[in-house]
Image (cartoon, grey):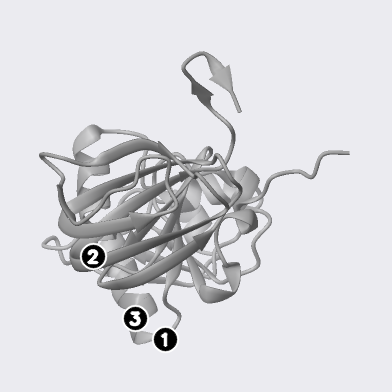
Amino acid sequence: MTKKTTISDFIDLSKFKSIICLDGDIAFEHLKNINLPIISADGATNKLVEQGILPDIVIGDLDSVNKETLKNLKHIRIKDQDHSDYQKALKYVAENNISPSMVFGINGGYIDHIMNNISIFSNTDDVFVDHKTVVQSLGFGIHRLNIQKDTKISIFGMPSCHLTTNGLKWDVTDRTLNFAGFNSPLNRMQDSNITLHISTGRALVVIYIYPISDCGLIV
């Protein structure tokens, strides 16, 4: 019998101390298998409760969450309009020493909201999980990934990074990746171990959880 693929095959779950849920498209098939404190950003609470999941705390300006639902949940109302509910959740996990976090619901909905969420996420050491991928934001240093051979992977400068890779089908050697310029999308693991050496900046690494088509073939 083929082993069912889970996100634990792609990231070390023991590194994370909490879950942040945003009001986007939440990958419940993954979320329900992780036992960590859940911080819900405002409107995401409605979706969680519909799935029978009660967050440990709700944070935000609380203008979207169902008011009757909120009565039964611990919550913090922050009226600050200069920061998003996502930023308020990040501040909470930092102050309570429960970071880094796994983030659900970054995508889905309006494109400007998605872009803003990704911009915020790219400056953290968190991981973002959706239905088909896990996304990591990596900064300066040498990062080693142990993932199944042939796994699809994309790397973007956020907004830029200087990078050398070892172990990809199309390795990047001493190159600068820019979000608005040269990047390394739709690459592939040549082996089960790769090394990413980031000398400056930050990189956004997108790892596909499931096999995807490549030139008409699925590997």
Circle 1 is placed at which residue position?
97
Circle 3 is placed at which residue position?
94
Q: Check the image and report above or below for 217 versus 97.
A: above
Dot 1: few (<14), some (14–19), or many (≥20) neighbours within 10 Å? few
Q: Which residue: 53% across, 41% down?
A: 151
Q: Quadrant of residue 137?
A: bottom left
Q: Check the image and report above or below for 28 versus 108.
A: below
Nearest the viewer among 6 and 64 is 6
Left/right placement of residue 20 relative to residue 36 reads: left
Q: CA distance from mark 1 to mark 2?
A: 17 Å
Residue 138 x/y as whole percent? 32, 64
- Amino acid on which the number 2 mark rests in the picture: Asn
Question: Under tag 2, what secondary structure?
Answer: loop
Marks 1/3 in contact by CB < 8 Å: the verdict is: yes
Q: Quadrant of the C terminus?
A: top right
Q: Is residue 140 visible?
A: yes
Nearest the viewer among 14 and 214 is 214
Marks 1/2 in contact by CB < 8 Å: the verdict is: no
Residue 188 x/y as whole percent? 45, 39
Nearest the viewer among 43 and 115 is 115
